[in-house]
Structure formats: C-alpha cells, structure tokens
Amino acid sequence: MNDAPHRDAFTGVLLIASLVLLVLGLVFPAFTVEKFWVFDNEKSIAGAVVALLSGKNILLGIVILLFSIAFPLSKLVLSLWIWASPDPRGRTTRHALKWAVRLGKWSMMDVFMVALVVAMLSLGMVAKVTAESGVYFFCAAILIGMWGSHRLHHRVEQSAPGS
C-alpha cells in the first residue's frame, strides 16, 4: 500500500519541527549576561559563535560551530533527505543513513556545549547569566530531532530486504 514504508507523516513532522526549532534556537537570544547589575548583553548561539571567531577565542568558536550548528544541521538535512527518498534501500540513501547515524552519536554534545558555556559564564563573580528562549528552542530541537531520526532509522531498517 505504501511504496515508501520509511516515510510516515509523523516522522516527517518531527524532523521538520526539529529543523525549525534548531534555526530558532540558533538565532533567538540564548542567554543574557548581566554585568555589574547594569549592563545586559543578549547573545544567540550563532551570535556567540561569530563573536568567538572574530575575537581571541577561535578554537572555542570552531568547537561550538561544529557541535552546535554544523553537526545538528547536517544530521537533520540528511535525515530529511533520507525521509524524502523514494527508495531507502538505495546505495546513496544507505550511505546517507550511515552518516546520519554517525552524526547522531554526537547529538547531545551540542546541548552539553551550550550548558557548559552558560555554566562557565555563571561562575563569574561579576556576571549573572539567564537562559533565554533560544536555549529552550535549541534543546527541544535536539531532542525532537533525536526522536525523529530514531524513528526514521528504525523504519528504514524495517524496510530493508529480509526484515
């Protein structure tokens, strides 16, 4: 009846919702740093990466760029491509699935990176850090993306010959 059994609507909704939430999480303010109880500075994750890369913290900027932007976006784009593929058994699709699974193993590293940055900033005696909507969008994107990718992987494996 269904010519692409791996392509159920709910998995597609999860993956698209995750992509939308990830973009919102990257561009909305992720945290506010209040210095000396006077100056407030809101930063998005993408804005923080740009600031780090243009400053003296290039290595930290690259690490956050990889784990918080490149890996999650790549995994979601690959997962959506696999989901949209008419033949989950095709060589290219299977190769993409392998890469999506590899990237998925790093899924919680990006949430850890954001938590680590917020924790490091919170330890400063002169600054107060408050989590903003971007952090919540970002974390929701990662969790929903993991759920969608897991469903997709399970359905592709079920549709493989001999299943």
Image: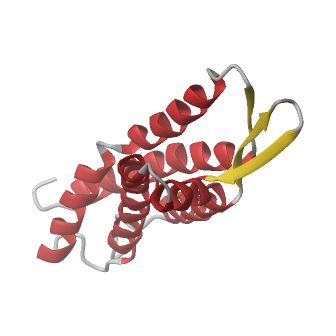
Please state which of residues 13 and 140 is positioned toward the viewer in this rendering.
140
In terms of depth relative to the viewer, which is nearer, 28 or 52? 52
Residue 41 horizontal side relative to residue 38, left or right: left
Q: From where the camera sits, is residue 72 visible? A: yes
Left or right, 48 with respect to 100, comes to right
The residue at 73%/25% (across/down) is: 126
Quadrant in which the N terminus appears? bottom left
- Please say which color scheme the image uses: secondary structure
In the displayed structure, would residue 113 be above or below residue 127?
A: below
Q: Position of residue 121 (x, y in %)?
A: 61, 31
Asked which quadrant contains residue 51, the reply is: bottom right
Q: Residue at x 36, y 64 (%)?
A: 74
Q: Nearer the viewer, residue 91 or 45?
A: 45
* Residue 1 in view, yes or no: no
At x 46%, y 38%, the residue is 113
Residue 2, image x, y percentages: 38, 73
Residue furthest bottom as drawn: 86
x, y percent for residue 54? 49, 62
Q: Nearer the viewer, residue 19 or 80?
A: 19
Image quadrant in which you'd find residue 117: top right
